[in-house]
Image (spheres, rainbow, N blue to C red):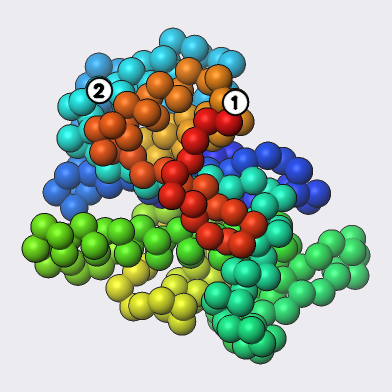
Amino acid sequence: MDGSPSDVLSLNADGGPHTIVMVFGQNQSIDLQQEEALQPFFPRFGLQKAVNPNDQALYRRRVMDVLADRETHRRLQVFAVTYDEATAMAAKDALLTRCYGEDGHRQFYSEFRAEQNRRLMAAFPSAFIKGKVISGKLNAILPMFIIAEFVASVHEQMEAMYNELRQPYAGLLVLSDKLCGDGEGGSPKATIVNGLLQSWYSDRMRVRSYSHPPKRCGEFLADNISGLLNACARDPSYPGWETARAMRRGRALSWQAMDSKGRFLPEMRAG
């Protein structure tokens, strides 16, 4: 799992769209955990970290072409959600209510102004790591609720898919690119996501941050795909829309948008 441009909102919630993707491969995604340098996922060229859409146009074009290929659709299943920063802030109360109930969040979640810079902070008094209360800037904490909701949504879709195929479904383990600020002050944000998932949904979902190195194929794929889709969300005329539509036709992409109620709309569209 990875996001573009990051999992932290700008302080004024005016930074535009953010896109989170979760990429699945064949054989329980074992092929995505290989080191890209030793076993490239796309042998035609080496996957790199996503770049600015205005730079390295040839590399971006190659990524678009290979993701639009039918053979790629057979090897990949991508889930994505896009949300605007202002929409995320508007959805905060709905997300809290869905998680904790109408009044239940008061004992699990609180907000306060930092004394030094007066920035709005969020804290989880009920979640302790090494005896410390988890807290952080609201613009960094709020996306953790969205990520938890996204993971739960994918879990439900995967379970339905397995049931339709009449195959056993054991659960979902998500290897996430290191969440911004993870590990600072002994309060990894992956713990927040897992805490929300355990109390909010079920015990068959876990999120783990992976470190760099090794650079896994899955990390590069998630980074490139989230960057591609977020560029599409910013610009309805971006050529990556051709790739997104091809992936949808090949049933390799499920791309949703979150509204101001914290709900995931059926399909993300241009414009």
Q: Residue at x 48, y 41 (%)?
A: 268
Q: Residue at x 26, y 38 (%)?
A: 251
Q: Which residue type does callout 2 highlight?
A: Asp
86 or 117: nearer the eye?
A: 86
Within 10 Å of disc 1 (Cα), the crowding (few <14, some 14-19, many 20+) is: some
Within 10 Å of disc 2 (Cα), the crowding (few <14, some 14-19, many 20+) is: some
Q: Position of residue 105 (x, y in %)?
A: 64, 83
Q: Position of residue 25 (x, y in %)?
A: 23, 44
Q: Secondary structure at mark 1?
A: loop
- Residue denoted by label 2: 69
Mark number for residue 83?
A: none
For marks 1 and 2, give the one nearer the viewer. 1
Q: Which residue type does callout 1 highlight?
A: Asp
**The image quarter in which residue 111 lies:** bottom right
**The image quarter in which residue 138 lies:** bottom right
- Residue denoted by label 1: 235
Could you tell whether 9 is left or right of 99 in the image?
right
Q: Position of residue 212 (x, y in %)?
A: 43, 45
Could you tell whether 198 is left or right of 73 in the image?
right
Q: Residue at x 59, y 54 (%)?
A: 259
220 or 18: nearer the eye?
A: 18
